[in-house]
Protein backbone atom coordinates (compact mmCIF):
# COMPACT_ATOMS: atom_id res chain seq x y z
CA UNK A 1 0.00 0.00 0.00
CA UNK A 2 1.26 3.45 -0.92
CA UNK A 3 1.13 6.32 1.56
CA UNK A 4 1.85 9.99 0.92
CA UNK A 5 2.72 12.06 4.02
CA UNK A 6 1.89 15.70 3.33
CA UNK A 7 3.71 17.68 6.00
CA UNK A 8 2.46 21.19 5.35
CA UNK A 9 1.71 24.60 6.72
CA UNK A 10 -1.81 26.01 6.51
CA UNK A 11 -3.07 25.33 2.95
CA UNK A 12 -5.12 28.00 1.13
CA UNK A 13 -8.62 26.96 0.11
CA UNK A 14 -7.82 26.83 -3.60
CA UNK A 15 -7.66 23.95 -6.05
CA UNK A 16 -4.34 25.21 -7.44
CA UNK A 17 -2.77 25.17 -3.95
CA UNK A 18 -3.85 21.57 -3.31
CA UNK A 19 -2.71 20.37 -6.70
CA UNK A 20 0.86 21.29 -5.75
CA UNK A 21 0.76 18.32 -3.37
CA UNK A 22 -1.38 15.86 -5.32
CA UNK A 23 0.63 16.07 -8.54
CA UNK A 24 3.45 14.23 -6.75
CA UNK A 25 1.22 11.45 -5.41
CA UNK A 26 0.70 8.12 -7.18
CA UNK A 27 -2.82 6.89 -7.86
CA UNK A 28 -4.39 4.61 -5.24
CA UNK A 29 -2.27 6.16 -2.46
CA UNK A 30 -3.51 7.11 1.00
CA UNK A 31 -2.75 10.83 1.36
CA UNK A 32 -2.50 12.14 4.94
CA UNK A 33 -2.41 15.72 6.28
CA UNK A 34 -1.77 17.07 9.79
CA UNK A 35 -4.12 18.95 12.14
CA UNK A 36 -5.17 22.55 11.47
CA UNK A 37 -3.86 22.38 7.90
CA UNK A 38 -7.17 23.18 6.21
CA UNK A 39 -8.44 25.32 9.08
CA UNK A 40 -7.22 28.24 11.12
CA UNK A 41 -5.50 27.30 14.37
CA UNK A 42 -7.60 27.40 17.55
CA UNK A 43 -6.46 30.87 18.66
CA UNK A 44 -7.45 32.27 15.24
CA UNK A 45 -10.72 30.32 15.04
CA UNK A 46 -11.79 31.88 18.34
CA UNK A 47 -11.66 35.30 16.64
CA UNK A 48 -13.63 34.17 13.56
CA UNK A 49 -17.43 34.23 13.27
CA UNK A 50 -19.16 30.86 13.24
CA UNK A 51 -21.02 31.91 10.11
CA UNK A 52 -17.73 32.31 8.27
CA UNK A 53 -16.38 29.00 9.57
CA UNK A 54 -19.59 27.26 8.48
CA UNK A 55 -19.43 28.79 5.03
CA UNK A 56 -15.88 27.60 4.47
CA UNK A 57 -16.51 24.15 5.96
CA UNK A 58 -18.59 22.84 3.05
CA UNK A 59 -16.22 24.36 0.49
CA UNK A 60 -13.26 22.53 2.05
CA UNK A 61 -15.08 19.22 2.09
CA UNK A 62 -16.23 19.53 -1.52
CA UNK A 63 -12.74 20.51 -2.67
CA UNK A 64 -11.13 17.49 -0.98
CA UNK A 65 -13.81 15.20 -2.40
CA UNK A 66 -13.03 16.47 -5.90
CA UNK A 67 -9.29 15.89 -5.30
CA UNK A 68 -9.97 12.30 -4.23
CA UNK A 69 -12.00 11.66 -7.40
CA UNK A 70 -9.66 13.43 -9.80
CA UNK A 71 -6.45 11.86 -8.49
CA UNK A 72 -7.92 8.47 -7.47
CA UNK A 73 -6.59 8.58 -3.93
CA UNK A 74 -7.86 8.20 -0.36
CA UNK A 75 -7.51 11.39 1.69
CA UNK A 76 -7.20 11.38 5.50
CA UNK A 77 -7.44 14.90 6.92
CA UNK A 78 -8.68 16.68 10.06
CA UNK A 79 -11.42 19.23 9.33
CA UNK A 80 -13.62 21.60 11.32
CA UNK A 81 -17.19 20.76 10.28
CA UNK A 82 -20.54 22.35 11.12
CA UNK A 83 -24.23 21.47 11.22
CA UNK A 84 -27.40 23.42 10.46
CA UNK A 85 -27.13 25.18 13.83
CA UNK A 86 -23.56 26.29 13.09
CA UNK A 87 -22.15 24.09 15.84
CA UNK A 88 -18.47 23.33 15.33
CA UNK A 89 -17.05 19.82 15.35
CA UNK A 90 -13.45 18.65 15.16
CA UNK A 91 -13.34 15.57 12.96
CA UNK A 92 -11.13 13.47 10.73
CA UNK A 93 -12.49 12.78 7.25
CA UNK A 94 -11.57 9.72 5.20
CA UNK A 95 -12.48 10.45 1.59
CA UNK A 96 -12.25 8.17 -1.43
CA UNK A 97 -13.77 8.52 -4.89
CA UNK A 98 -17.13 7.12 -3.76
CA UNK A 99 -17.74 8.02 -0.12
CA UNK A 100 -16.75 10.17 2.84
CA UNK A 101 -16.43 8.82 6.39
CA UNK A 102 -16.10 10.89 9.56
CA UNK A 103 -14.44 10.33 12.92
CA UNK A 104 -15.48 12.73 15.69
CA UNK A 105 -12.65 13.44 18.14
CA UNK A 106 -13.61 12.09 21.57
CA UNK A 107 -10.76 13.32 23.81
CA UNK A 108 -10.01 17.01 23.31
CA UNK A 109 -7.34 19.19 24.90
CA UNK A 110 -8.73 20.99 27.95
CA UNK A 111 -5.89 23.08 29.32
CA UNK A 112 -6.22 26.69 30.38
CA UNK A 113 -3.95 27.94 27.59
CA UNK A 114 -5.24 25.48 24.93
CA UNK A 115 -8.89 24.52 25.46
CA UNK A 116 -10.46 22.75 22.51
CA UNK A 117 -13.17 21.06 24.56
CA UNK A 118 -14.61 24.41 25.57
CA UNK A 119 -14.58 25.78 22.01
CA UNK A 120 -15.83 22.83 19.94
CA UNK A 121 -19.22 21.15 20.22
CA UNK A 122 -18.00 17.55 20.04
CA UNK A 123 -20.17 15.26 22.22
CA UNK A 124 -18.82 14.65 25.71
CA UNK A 125 -19.18 10.87 25.77
CA UNK A 126 -19.14 9.15 29.14
CA UNK A 127 -17.78 6.04 27.45
CA UNK A 128 -15.28 6.15 24.63
CA UNK A 129 -16.36 4.60 21.35
CA UNK A 130 -14.29 2.62 18.88
CA UNK A 131 -12.45 5.01 16.51
CA UNK A 132 -13.11 4.86 12.79
CA UNK A 133 -11.53 1.79 11.17
CA UNK A 134 -11.52 1.34 7.39
CA UNK A 135 -10.05 -1.24 5.07
CA UNK A 136 -7.87 -0.44 2.08
CA UNK A 137 -5.65 -2.69 -0.03
CA UNK A 138 -6.10 -5.49 2.50
CA UNK A 139 -5.04 -3.30 5.45
CA UNK A 140 -7.19 -2.48 8.47
CA UNK A 141 -6.49 1.17 9.30
CA UNK A 142 -7.64 3.14 12.34
CA UNK A 143 -7.65 6.93 12.68
CA UNK A 144 -7.38 9.05 15.81
CA UNK A 145 -6.30 12.58 16.73
CA UNK A 146 -2.89 13.22 18.25
CA UNK A 147 -4.12 14.09 21.75
CA UNK A 148 -5.97 10.76 21.87
CA UNK A 149 -2.69 8.84 22.00
CA UNK A 150 -2.76 9.40 25.78
CA UNK A 151 -5.93 7.37 26.45
CA UNK A 152 -5.54 3.62 26.98
CA UNK A 153 -9.23 2.85 26.39
CA UNK A 154 -9.05 3.98 22.76
CA UNK A 155 -5.99 1.84 22.11
CA UNK A 156 -7.66 -1.21 23.64
CA UNK A 157 -10.55 -0.70 21.22
CA UNK A 158 -8.14 -0.40 18.30
CA UNK A 159 -6.45 -3.62 19.41
CA UNK A 160 -9.83 -5.36 19.55
CA UNK A 161 -10.39 -4.23 15.95
CA UNK A 162 -7.11 -5.93 14.97
CA UNK A 163 -5.84 -2.89 13.08
CA UNK A 164 -2.67 -3.13 11.03
CA UNK A 165 -1.94 0.58 11.17
CA UNK A 166 -3.09 3.71 13.01
CA UNK A 167 -2.99 7.09 11.26
CA UNK A 168 -2.62 9.99 13.68
CA UNK A 169 -2.62 13.62 12.49
CA UNK A 170 -1.16 16.10 14.99
CA UNK A 171 -0.45 19.80 15.51
CA UNK A 172 2.45 19.46 17.94
CA UNK A 173 4.68 22.33 19.07
CA UNK A 174 6.56 23.59 22.14
CA UNK A 175 9.60 21.27 22.00
CA UNK A 176 7.49 18.16 22.65
CA UNK A 177 8.84 15.91 19.91
CA UNK A 178 10.95 13.61 22.10
CA UNK A 179 7.89 12.80 24.20
CA UNK A 180 5.80 12.17 21.08
CA UNK A 181 8.40 9.77 19.71
CA UNK A 182 8.40 7.76 22.93
CA UNK A 183 4.59 7.63 23.09
CA UNK A 184 4.21 6.60 19.45
CA UNK A 185 6.85 3.89 19.64
CA UNK A 186 5.27 2.51 22.81
CA UNK A 187 1.74 2.45 21.34
CA UNK A 188 2.86 0.77 18.12
CA UNK A 189 4.88 -1.84 20.00
CA UNK A 190 2.23 -2.69 22.61
CA UNK A 191 -0.59 -2.82 20.05
CA UNK A 192 1.41 -4.77 17.47
CA UNK A 193 0.58 -2.31 14.70
CA UNK A 194 2.26 0.34 12.58
CA UNK A 195 1.68 3.98 13.46
CA UNK A 196 1.87 6.99 11.14
CA UNK A 197 2.12 10.36 12.88
CA UNK A 198 1.72 13.36 10.54
CA UNK A 199 2.53 16.70 12.15
CA UNK A 200 2.02 20.12 10.57
CA UNK A 201 4.61 22.87 10.16
CA UNK A 202 4.39 26.65 10.31
CA UNK A 203 3.72 29.24 13.01
CA UNK A 204 0.78 30.55 14.98
CA UNK A 205 0.01 32.07 18.38
CA UNK A 206 -1.23 30.56 21.62
CA UNK A 207 -2.26 32.86 24.47
CA UNK A 208 -0.34 35.72 22.80
CA UNK A 209 2.82 33.60 22.57
CA UNK A 210 4.33 32.66 19.21
CA UNK A 211 4.53 28.91 18.67
CA UNK A 212 6.11 26.83 15.91
CA UNK A 213 4.81 23.48 14.67
CA UNK A 214 7.97 21.51 14.09
CA UNK A 215 6.88 18.79 11.64
CA UNK A 216 9.17 15.75 12.01
CA UNK A 217 6.41 13.37 10.94
CA UNK A 218 7.36 9.71 11.14
CA UNK A 219 6.32 6.10 10.59
CA UNK A 220 6.73 3.53 13.37
CA UNK A 221 6.80 -0.24 12.79
CA UNK A 222 5.13 -2.80 15.11
CA UNK A 223 8.58 -3.40 16.63
CA UNK A 224 8.56 0.20 17.85
CA UNK A 225 11.25 1.28 15.40
CA UNK A 226 11.20 4.56 13.45
CA UNK A 227 11.30 3.51 9.81
CA UNK A 228 11.48 7.06 8.50
CA UNK A 229 11.40 10.58 9.87
CA UNK A 230 10.89 13.91 8.10
CA UNK A 231 12.52 17.28 8.79
CA UNK A 232 10.90 20.53 9.96
CA UNK A 233 9.94 21.87 6.52
CA UNK A 234 7.01 21.77 4.11
CA UNK A 235 7.50 18.52 2.18
CA UNK A 236 5.94 15.30 0.90
CA UNK A 237 7.20 11.80 1.62
CA UNK A 238 5.86 8.77 -0.27
CA UNK A 239 6.15 5.31 1.29
CA UNK A 240 5.17 1.81 0.26
CA UNK A 241 4.02 -0.36 3.16
CA UNK A 242 3.64 -4.13 2.94
CA UNK A 243 0.98 -5.75 5.12
CA UNK A 244 3.02 -8.94 5.27
CA UNK A 245 5.89 -7.06 6.91
CA UNK A 246 3.54 -5.51 9.50
CA UNK A 247 1.92 -8.87 10.30
CA UNK A 248 5.26 -10.65 10.62
CA UNK A 249 6.66 -8.00 12.98
CA UNK A 250 3.47 -8.08 15.07
CA UNK A 251 3.81 -11.88 15.45
CA UNK A 252 7.29 -11.61 16.96
CA UNK A 253 5.93 -10.42 20.32
CA UNK A 254 2.26 -11.34 19.83
CA UNK A 255 0.84 -8.36 21.74
CA UNK A 256 -1.90 -7.74 19.18
CA UNK A 257 -3.51 -11.15 19.74
CA UNK A 258 -2.35 -11.80 23.33
CA UNK A 259 -5.02 -13.50 25.45
CA UNK A 260 -5.06 -12.52 29.11
CA UNK A 261 -5.03 -15.38 31.60
CA UNK A 262 -7.65 -15.13 34.29
CA UNK A 263 -6.97 -16.60 37.71
CA UNK A 264 -9.28 -19.30 39.05
CA UNK A 265 -11.90 -18.26 41.56
CA UNK A 266 -11.36 -19.62 45.04
Image (tube, rainbow, N blue to C red):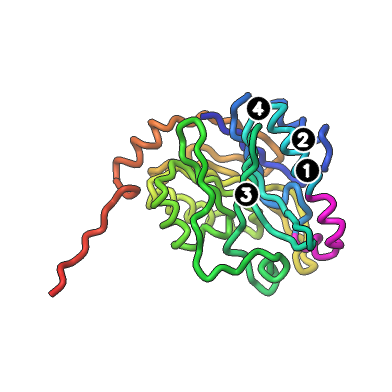
x, y percent for residue 111: 65, 72
43 within the magenta span: yes
Instruction: For marks 1 and 3, give the one nearer the viewer.
Output: 3
Residue occupied by mark 1:
11
Please name whichever residue, 69 or 116, is drawn nearer the observer in this view of the structure.
Answer: 69
The numbered mark, 3 or 4, whose residue comes first in the sequence reads: 4
**Residue 261 position within the rendered picture, expressed as x and y whole percent measured from the top left:** 21, 60
Residue marked by disc 3: 102
Residue beneath disc 2: 18
Residue in the image at 55% along x and 40% along y: 229
Instruction: Tell me the CA gap for discs 1 and 3.
Output: 21 Å
Circles 4, 2 touching at the beta carbon (< 8 Å): no
**Mark 2 vs 3: CB contact within 8 A:** no
Is 236 inside the magenta-drawn segment? no
Q: Are marks 3 and 4 in contact (CB under 8 Å)?
A: no
**Label 4 to label 2: alpha-carbon separation:** 14 Å
First in sequence, mark 2 or 3: give its number: 2
Magenta stretch, overall SS:
helix
In the picture of the structure, the residue carrying the numbered disc 4 is: 72
Given the current orientation, which residue lies at the most extreme left position? 266
Tally the marks: 4
Q: Nearer the viewer, mark 2 or mark 3?
A: 3
Name the secondary structure under disc 1.
Answer: loop
What separation in Å lies between label 3 and label 4 (alpha carbons)? 19 Å
Instruction: Answer with left or right where residue 228 lies relative to residue 173.
Output: left
- Quick one: label 1, few (<14), some, or many (20+) residues within 10 Å? few
In percent of the image, x 78 and y 58: which residue is there? 84
State left or right for residue 144 relative to residue 249: right
Asked which quadrant contains residue 109, the reply is bottom right
Magenta stretch bounds: 42-57
Amino acid sequence: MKIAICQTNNVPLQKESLEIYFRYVEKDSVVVFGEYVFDLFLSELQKTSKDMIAQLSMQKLELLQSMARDYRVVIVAPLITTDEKNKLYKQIVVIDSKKTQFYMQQCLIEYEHWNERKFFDNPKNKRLKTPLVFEYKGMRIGVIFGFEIHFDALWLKLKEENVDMVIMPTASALQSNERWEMLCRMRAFCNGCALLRVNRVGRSTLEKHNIEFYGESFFVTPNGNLMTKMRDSDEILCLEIQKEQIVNEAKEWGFRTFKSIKGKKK
